[in-house]
């Protein structure tokens, strides 16, 4: 081909290329095309040779590789390769059997779990009860009062181990306690009879004089003075009336003045013979002799004193006359002193005319003004004391005048003035600095307290300042901490409580001394119920009769459950000593209860049967069913008697009877109840049927153990509980369903005993010769009857709705097999 032809072909190709819009126009030289071809060949042969070859191979066969890749990605092997579940035939019987066994096992597991939880709860309840007892002991050992905290604890019976001869033969009461107890008995006797109640303070203080203890006599003397006031109403809180009656301040001053007169008489008697004591005995002559001994040139006590009468300093005469409570003697001293004391004389005359009442505002203002302008700067300390006391001008520290605690307390009490109505005044209308009654109480109890008065070494002194400031509750609680005074403190509390003078807590679970948030400071409340129970605990086992007398003071109080506290305490005592016959009497065979110690207290508030019921309930909680049966019998609750007697009989019915054993005691009790409760209608029929069935079963097993088989079968046939023929099977099953669980527990032993009787009769009959029967058919007929009875028993065991132990069922079946 020449070049012209080649050029034409090239142009033709060029024109065709330009005319095509499908491919982009590429202008490359031949070397560039050669180089690109080599690069493409090199890349294909080195990296993607296998893919290219695969594309070429599949493409030659008409297969598009990209479409195949998309289809492969959309495929899922999840359903294709899942394992197939084998389909088996439905086994209905196996399914039901598995469900039944699962239900049984779940019930067993549930019962086991509940039993375990019940045992755990009882264990922790027992531990908690022990800790509560220890808590009570710790709380009662506390010295200080509570600070608005309430600890819910209950006094429970404390388990003790006592020698019976000691417990009943020797009293724990000493001579003082026995003397008080006798007076308590006489007082309660009058209260129960509805007679006029005597004053317990007078009765107890009279007894205290027999003890030859000076401090004890002084204690009762203080209480006698402080309770010689107008009786307080029963319906009001003692705090609301006691701290508003000026009589308590007046009585406290009266006691201190009386004691000071005795001191002066003793002081003078020791130093002067009768001839030198003056003329007619009077307070003025007594004070004159006392001042003459203490204020003279030899003693050097007259320095700074103003005025004299009959050679004696005036103001000590006036002060000591007032200190003895004799205003007339003070007036006589001022009148002999002459002019210059008119205001003070007027005040004293008004006080003499209107004792325990406030002086006129005009005279009070005059005394206050005179004191502030002149008297308070005087060198005569007795004059300052007289004006300060009468005018209630301030609370001066008369250290040289008030040499003793009694003097200090008398001055403080003298500063407290009544209002216009004769009641306690806690505020002063004229703005004076005189103290209030509550401020004085706070100063004694909280500011100074036990440490200041050295109370542990001088308990009598601290009791005195508390009692004379009307703080009976902390005074009694403090005195009860000392062994020497504890008995007296308890009886002081009893006497004051009967006079409605004590502030009591809201409930009996509070500590011995507590603070009520609604009371003004520094009032305390005394838990008299706890005080009595702690006191009685020392002798309640050895002297239950005396313990009941003290518990009777708690008859109007309620325990946290709302029960009469007297009955609760009697219940605790009965459980502690377990001498129910002594406390509640004994039920006789005619159904009449003999009288016990508690019968003397029977009234509208105290029901002896209710007390027996409470004790029975507590005994049931402790598992003492035999004692509970006795108490329920005394309470006349027949249903509870039969219920718990059946529970006790159930485990011992099948045992061999032994004289004096639990089974023997219960059987005798059941026979007694059968006679007395034969016509009782207010009792559940199932409980009655269960009880009488168990009673007859005791008789059956006695006959069985004594090998009186025929009598045993006759007893059993009357019960209609075990079938002696197949025709009786349905009736016996129905009878079984109506009885309680107590009979069900005996049923396995009952079936075994019955089967043993039948098997014994079978062996005896089988071993006899033919001449004993008319024909062999008669013998075989008797044997067949025994076989039918054995068959009825095994069918009964399989039919009753009660899960028999496995060995019982197998033994019954084996015995039946031996009879064929």
Image: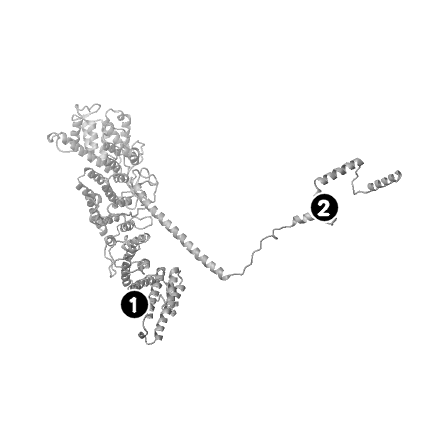
Viewer-proximal residue among 721 and 459: 721
**Res. 531 image quadrant:** top left
Kindly tell me whether residue 303 is visible in this rendering. yes
Identify the residue at the far bottom of this view: 774
Residue 630 vs 374, above or below: the answer is below
Residue matched to label 2? 55
Secondary element type, mark 2? helix
**Res. 239 image quadrant:** top left
Residue 368 vs 423, above or below: the answer is above
- Please rate how many residues cluster around mark 2, counting C-alpha atoms within 10 Å: few if below 14, some from 14 to 19, many from 20: some
Kindly tell me whether residue 227 is visible in this rendering. no
Q: Can you say which quadrant of the picture contains the N terminus? A: top right
Viewer-proximal residue among 744 and 505: 744
- Please rate how many residues cluster around mark 1, counting C-alpha atoms within 10 Å: few if below 14, some from 14 to 19, many from 20: some
Which numbered disc flags the more N-terminal residue, 2 or 1?
Answer: 2
Q: CA distance from mark 2 to mark 1?
A: 110 Å
Viewer-proximal residue among 194 and 284: 194
Residue 227 % position (x, y) = 23, 41
**Res. 446 image quadrant:** top left
Q: Can you say which quadrant of the picture contains the C terminus? A: bottom left
Viewer-proximal residue among 172 and 276: 172
Residue 303 % position (x, y) = 21, 23
Residue matched to label 1? 711
Q: How many marks?
A: 2
Residues marked 2 and 1 touching at CB (< 8 Å): no
Residue 128 % position (x, y) = 34, 46
Residue at figure coordinates x 71%, y 46% from the top left: 54
> Which mark, residue 275?
none
The colour scheme of the drawn protein is one colour
Residue 739 % position (x, y) = 36, 62
């Amino acid at each position: 081909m020449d070049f012209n032809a080649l050029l034409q072909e090239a142009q033709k190709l060029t024109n065709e290329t330009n005319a095509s819009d499908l491919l982009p126009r590429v202008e490359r030289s031949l070397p560039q095309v050669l180089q690109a071809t080599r690069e493409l060949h090199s890349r294909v042969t080195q990296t993607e040779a296998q893919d290219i070859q695969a594309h070429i191979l599949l493409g030659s066969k008409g297969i598009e590789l990209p479409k195949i890749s998309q289809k492969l990605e959309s495929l899922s092997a999840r359903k294709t390769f899942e394992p197939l579940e084998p389909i088996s035939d439905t086994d209905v019987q196996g399914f039901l059997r598995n469900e039944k066994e699962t239900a049984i096992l779940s019930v067993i597991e549930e019962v086991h779990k509940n039993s375990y939880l019940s045992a755990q709860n009882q264990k922790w309840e027992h531990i908690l009860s022990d800790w509560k007892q220890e808590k009570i002991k710790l709380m009662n050992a506390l010295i200080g009062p509570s600070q608005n905290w309430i600890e819910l604890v209950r006094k429970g019976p404390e388990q003790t181990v006592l020698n019976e001869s000691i417990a009943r033969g020797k009293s724990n009461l000493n001579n003082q306690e026995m003397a008080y107890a006798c007076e308590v008995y006489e007082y309660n006797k009058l209260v129960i009879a509805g007679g006029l109640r005597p004053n317990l303070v007078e009765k107890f203080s009279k007894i205290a004089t027999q003890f030859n203890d000076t401090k004890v006599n002084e204690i009762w003397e203080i209480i006698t003075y402080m309770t010689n006031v107008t009786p307080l109403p029963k319906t009001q809180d003692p705090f609301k009336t006691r701290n508003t009656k000026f009589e308590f301040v007046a009585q406290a001053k009266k006691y201190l003045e009386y004691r000071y007169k005795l001191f002066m008489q003793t002081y003078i008697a020791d130093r002067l013979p009768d001839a030198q004591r003056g003329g007619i005995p009077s307070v003025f002559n007594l004070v004159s002799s006392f001042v003459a001994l203490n204020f003279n040139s030899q003693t050097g006590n007259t320095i700074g004193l103003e005025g004299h009468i009959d050679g004696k300093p005036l103001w000590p005469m006036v002060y000591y006359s007032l200190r003895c409570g004799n205003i007339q003697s003070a007036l006589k001293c001022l009148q002999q002193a002459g002019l210059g004391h008119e205001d003070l004389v007027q005040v004293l005359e008004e006080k003499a005319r209107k004792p325990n009442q406030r002086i006129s505002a005009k005279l009070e203002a005059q005394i206050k003004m005179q004191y502030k302008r002149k008297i308070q700067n005087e060198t005569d300390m007795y004059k300052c004391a007289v004006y300060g006391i009468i005018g209630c001008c301030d609370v001066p520290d008369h250290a040289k005048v008030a040499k003793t605690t009694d003097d200090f307390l008398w001055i403080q009490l003298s500063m407290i003035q009544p209002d216009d109505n004769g009641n306690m005044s806690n505020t002063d209308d004229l703005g004076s600095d005189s103290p209030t009654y509550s401020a004085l109480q706070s100063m004694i109890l909280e500011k100074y307290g036990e440490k200041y008065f050295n109370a542990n070494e001088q308990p009598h002194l601290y009791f005195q300042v508390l009692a004379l400031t009307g703080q009976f509750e902390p005074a009694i609680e403090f005195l009860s901490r000392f062994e020497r005074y504890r008995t007296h403190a308890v009886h002081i509390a009893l006497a004051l409580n009967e006079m409605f003078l004590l502030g009591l807590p809201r409930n009996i679970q509070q500590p011995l001394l507590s603070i009520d948030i609604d009371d003004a400071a520094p009032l305390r409340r005394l838990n008299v119920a706890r005080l009595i129970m702690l006191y009685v605990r020392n002798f309640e086992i050895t002297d239950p009769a005396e313990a009941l007398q003290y518990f009777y003071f708690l008859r109007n109080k309620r325990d946290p459950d709302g029960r009469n506290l007297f009955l609760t305490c009697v219940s605790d005592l009965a459980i502690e000593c377990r001498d129910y016959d002594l406390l509640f009497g004994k039920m006789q065979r005619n159904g009449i209860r003999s009288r016990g110690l508690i019968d003397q207290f029977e009234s509208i508030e105290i029901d002896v049967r209710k007390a027996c019921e409470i004790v029975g309930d507590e005994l049931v909680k402790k598992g003492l069913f035999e004692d509970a049966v006795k108490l329920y019998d005394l309470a006349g609750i027949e249903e509870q008697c039969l219920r718990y007697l059946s529970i006790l009989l159930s485990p011992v019915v099948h045992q061999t009877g032994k004289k004096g054993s639990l089974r023997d005691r219960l059987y005798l009790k059941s026979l007694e109840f059968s006679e007395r409760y034969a016509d009782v209608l207010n009792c559940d029929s199932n409980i009655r049927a269960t009880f009488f069935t168990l009673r007859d079963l005791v008789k059956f097993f006695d006959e069985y153990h004594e090998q009186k088989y025929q009598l045993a079968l006759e007893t059993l046939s009357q019960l209609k509980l075990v079938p002696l023929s197949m025709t009786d099977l349905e009736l016996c099953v129905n009878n079984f369903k109506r009885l309680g669980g107590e009979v069900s527990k005996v049923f396995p032993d009952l079936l075994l005993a019955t089967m043993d009787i039948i098997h014994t009769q079978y062996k005896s009959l089988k071993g006899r010769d033919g001449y004993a029967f008319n024909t062999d058919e008669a013998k075989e007929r008797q044997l067949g009857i025994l076989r039918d009875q054995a068959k009825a028993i095994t069918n009964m065991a399989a039919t009753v709705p009660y899960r028999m132990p496995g060995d019982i069922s197998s033994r019954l079946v084996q015995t039946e097999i031996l009879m064929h």
